[in-house]
Amino acid sequence: MDDRTYTADAEPGDTVTVAGWVHEVRDLGGIAFLILRDTTGKIQVKFEVEEMDDDLVETGLNVHRESVISVTGDVEEEPRAPTGVEVTPASVDVISEADPELPLDPSGKVDAELSTRLDNRTLDLRKDEVKAIFEIRAEVLRAVREQFRELGCTEINTPKIVATGTEGGTELFPITYFGQEAFMNQSPQLFKQLMVGSGLERVFEIGPIFRAEEHNTPRHLNEATSIDFESAFADHTEAMDACEAVVKAAYEAVEENCQDELVALDLADEFEAPEGDFPRLTYEEAIERINATGELDEPLVWGDDLPTEGEHALGQDVGEHYFITDWPSEIKPFYIMDKDDEVSTGFDMMHPEMELVSGGQREHRYDHLVDGFEQQGLDPEAFDYYTKMFKYGMPPHAGWGLGGERLIMTMLGLGNIREAVLFPRDRQRLSP
Ligand code: ATP
Ligand code: AMO
């Protein structure tokens, strides 16, 4: 529709054609108002029942909510209208009539369960506060890409159908690949490492990861978006610096460019980009601080993974984003470089509510890498496509993976990670 005007651009004195959804019809007897909504906002359309053509009034007042219509008419100033202007229609065209029985109310006056909302995402995203999440998500990804560019990274895309897993502790989704066993990729881990040995040196990828998590939790998805970084000639501290820069850039971009969306989410007053360096605690300090909170029944000992309640207690104690460094080697994956017999270069970056990032310096020495596979009960032969490249000149390197939805979820204080995905995949949900 070339001749269409967005509602936000309709100025008094203009003759416009506005098109969008019927948000609401209010019939006050002699006068009636139709509120038309498009992606830029809403505009009032006024029907003076006695003075206007009967067909026009009938069309305008009988159209069901959420139908798609276009209205042509003159724009006038009207201080009592929600946006200060209104359209007096010369014609109304019903383009796509909506069923009067809506599965959910896009005006938000009637609350709907999350599952009803996810089943009807198209209608759900007509709400300003839901649309705002995805506008912010897009801004975060834009800002993250820009920050990676400033860090000198090249964007890569790696395969999602693979022959082996990498992340122990979470299950793989098996698929059949021309009669051969294959899996949906859990992480671009091995491929991004292969690339830092290739001459690209510093890479990032934003793409889906697939994890057959058994449980339904508010912070796990079966298909998530991983933001991955990997750099040659870097150690874990440089990887942490890059991680901090990327997370801060995301917050700063939202603060700067998404004020309308923050208002829609009722977050404009409280939203703050993190300032200052993220504290860096060692694993040992972390478990001591968790134990000191007295929140756990059993105190943690060296080698324990941090349980969810422990992460939460520590998050409350620290009160801002922070890193946990110097994890025990035994609970970090085979590809993480050890500092000594017990301690690794692995790190996690935490939001007070949950883990956002895992990373570390990588083992780039062929013999150590192959030994590491064996120690974790993995068959090095199956990973030959990966390990063999470590025989032909692999620089020291480090990197991390950041959960995209967890970043959005924690940034906006969403209670459920599914709020940050258009069409989430979980135990119960395979469509839409
Ligand atoms: P990892 O980082 O170890 O590869 P992950 O990203 O799933 O796995 P988190 O989600 O941060 O790790 O998990 C932290 C803690 O949350 C775990 O130690 C465990 O206690 C708990 N947890 C992890 N997965 C689940 C799950 N599917 N259901 C319930 N609790 C879980
Ligand atoms: P890890 O398994 O810790 O590390 O994953 C990195 C980050 O990805 C997010 N994440 C998830 N988000 C939602 N649902 C899930 N099921 C899910 N699983 C993971 C989390 C997590 O912190 N290869 C390493 C990264 C690296 O070392 O570069 C890895 O995948 O925010």
Image (cartoon, rainbow, N blue to C red):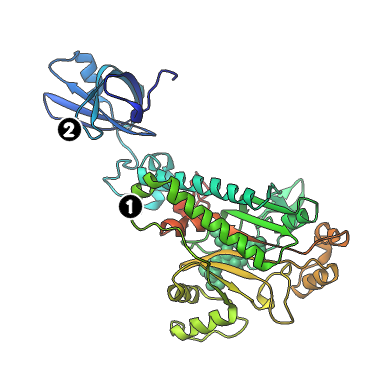
| N-term-proximal mark, 1 vs 2 | 2
Foreground residue among 384 and 283: 283
**On screen, residue 136 above or below 45:** below
Few, some or many residues within 10 Å of mark 1 (<14, 14–19, 20+): few
Residue 377, quarter of picture: bottom right
Q: Which residue is mark 2?
A: 80
Image region (quadrant) for ligand 1? bottom right
**Helix or strand or loop: what does disc 1 sit on?**
loop
**On screen, residue 155 above or below 232:** above
Q: Is residue 55 visible?
A: yes
**Marks 1 and 2, how far apart in space?**
24 Å
Q: Position of residue 162 (x, y in %)?
A: 73, 53
**Helix or strand or loop: what does disc 2 sit on?**
loop
Q: Tell me what residue is drawn at x 33 percent, y 52 percent.
A: 266
Q: Position of residue 102 (x, y in %)?
A: 33, 38
Indicate the amino acid at tag 2. Answer: Arg
Q: How many marks?
A: 2
Indicate the amino acid at tag 1. Answer: Asp
Q: Tell me what residue is drawn at x 80 percent, y 52 percent.
A: 198
Q: Which residue is mark 1?
A: 266
Foreground residue among 317 and 330: 317
Q: Residue furthest top?
A: 53
